[in-house]
Amino acid sequence: MAAYGPQWKHQRKFAMTTLRDFGVGKRSLEGKVNEEANALVQEFLSKNGQPFDLKITMQNAVSNIICSIVFGDRFEYGDHDFLRLISLLNATVEAKPTVIDRLSMILPVFRHLGLFVRSREEKSLKMFQALQEFCGEQVEKHRATFDPNDIRDFIDAFLLEQQRAQDEKSRENFSDKQLLEVLIDLFLAGTETTATTIRWTLLYMMENPEVKEKVHQEIDSVLGQTPPSYAQRNQLPYTNATLAEVLRIKPIVPLSVPHAASRDTTLNGYNIPQEAMIMVNLWSVHMDPQLFPEPNKFRPERFLDQDGNFVKHEAVIPFSVGHRICLGEQLAKMELYMLFVSLMQRFTFNLPEGAPKPSMVGGTGGVINTPFPFELCAIPRG
C-alpha cells in the first residue's frame, strides 16, 4: 500500500532479488518446504484420525517456511516465540473493518466525522506494534551475530545493505524502520493467504469425493510413496487443475488490497482524483460466466485440454496483475503444490461422523476470504 515511486521500486527490487537468492523458485527452497511438509504430516498423524481444526496447524507450517527464509531457521510448533508470532499474525489479520470503515472507503467524508471506534484503532495499533517488537527482537539477535561473509537469510541480506550504504538516500532505503515493515509485510502476506487456500482445498476435497478420488489416483500412479518434487508437477495435471480451480473459485483476497491513484486520471469515462482509494474486484473476473461457464460449479476439468494436459487460463488472477502483482506468487505456488500433494499422498480427508455440512460460502468479515471454522478427520492411507 506504499506510494508508487522510487522508494517502493527500490524495496520491491531488493525483496525480489533477495527472495530469489534464498531459493524462491529454485530447488534449494524445495528442501525447506519438504521439511515442513514432513513436520505437517507428523502433526496430522498425531491426531490418530480424530476430528480437529487444522487452521493453526496450517498456519504453523506456512509461517515456518517464511521463517526459514527470513530468520534462517524454522521453529518447533510448540516453541513459545513461535506461538506468540502466530497469535500476533492472527490478531492482526482477523481485525474486522467496521461499518464506518467500509463507508469511509466509499465516501471519504466519513473519515472526518469522528465516528471511528477509538478502542478498535488502539487495539489494531497495539497488535501491529507487538509484531514490530517481535521482528525487532529477531533483528537484534541477527545483528549480534552478523558476519558479512556469511549471509544466512533475508535479515542478514538487509543488514549487509545497511553496512554498504554510503549516502543519505541509501541509508533511508535501508533503515531499521524499513526492515521491520518489510518483515511484517512478508509474514502478513505470506502466512494466512497460503494456509487459508489449503484449508479451502481440503474442504473442496471433502465436498467433491469424485475429485478427491481422481487426485489420489493420479498421485498414486505417478509418485506412489516417493516424496513429491516440484519439478514433477507437470506429471500431475489433474492435481494442478484442482489447485487452479480452488484459486479461481475462492480467491483469497477477492478485492485485492487497497490501492490509490497516484495522479488525477480518467478511466472508461470516469474521473478518478489523485489519492482516491481503488479496490480491484478480482472475484468478478473469476466468476464471469463468459470466461468460466457455470462459474459456481467446482470443475477442475476446465483447466485440462482434450489430451488431459493442464492448461493455464490468463483470467485466473488470484495474485493480481501489473506492477503490484504478489511478490510471493512463486513461493505460494510451490507451497500449495508441495503441501497439498504431501497431505493427499498420506491421508484421505473426511468430515467427522454426524458433523453438519460445512459452509462453502467464505468471508468472515476481514480482507481475507476465509472459510468458517470446521473440523476434519485425517485418515492415514495404506
Image (tube, rainbow, N blue to C red):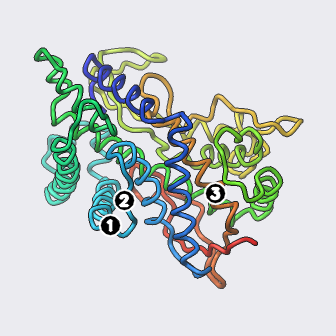
* Residue 73 or residue 250, whichever sits in front: 73
Q: What residue type is labelled 1?
A: Asp
- Residue sitting at 49 percent across and 43 percent down? 254
Residue 75 tag number: 2
Q: In this view, does 127 lie to the left or right of 313?
A: left
Residue 79 tag number: 1
Q: How crowded is mark 3: few (under 14 residues within 10 Å), some or many (20 or more)?
A: many
Is there CB contact under 8 Å for labels 2 and 1? yes
Quarter-of-image position of residue 203:
bottom right
Q: Residue furthest front?
A: 149
Q: What residue type is labelled 2?
A: Phe
Q: Which residue lies furthest to the left in this view?
A: 168
Image quadrant for the C terminus? bottom right
Q: In this view, does 233 lie to the left or right of 301?
A: left
* Residue 255 or residue 176, whichever sits in front: 176
Quarter-of-image position of residue 45:
bottom right
- Residue sitting at 14 percent across and 56 percent down? 122
- Give x and y (percent) for residue 36: 50, 56
- Residue sitting at 32 percent across and 61 percent down? 82
Residue 106 tag number: none
- Give x and y (percent) for residue 243: 65, 47
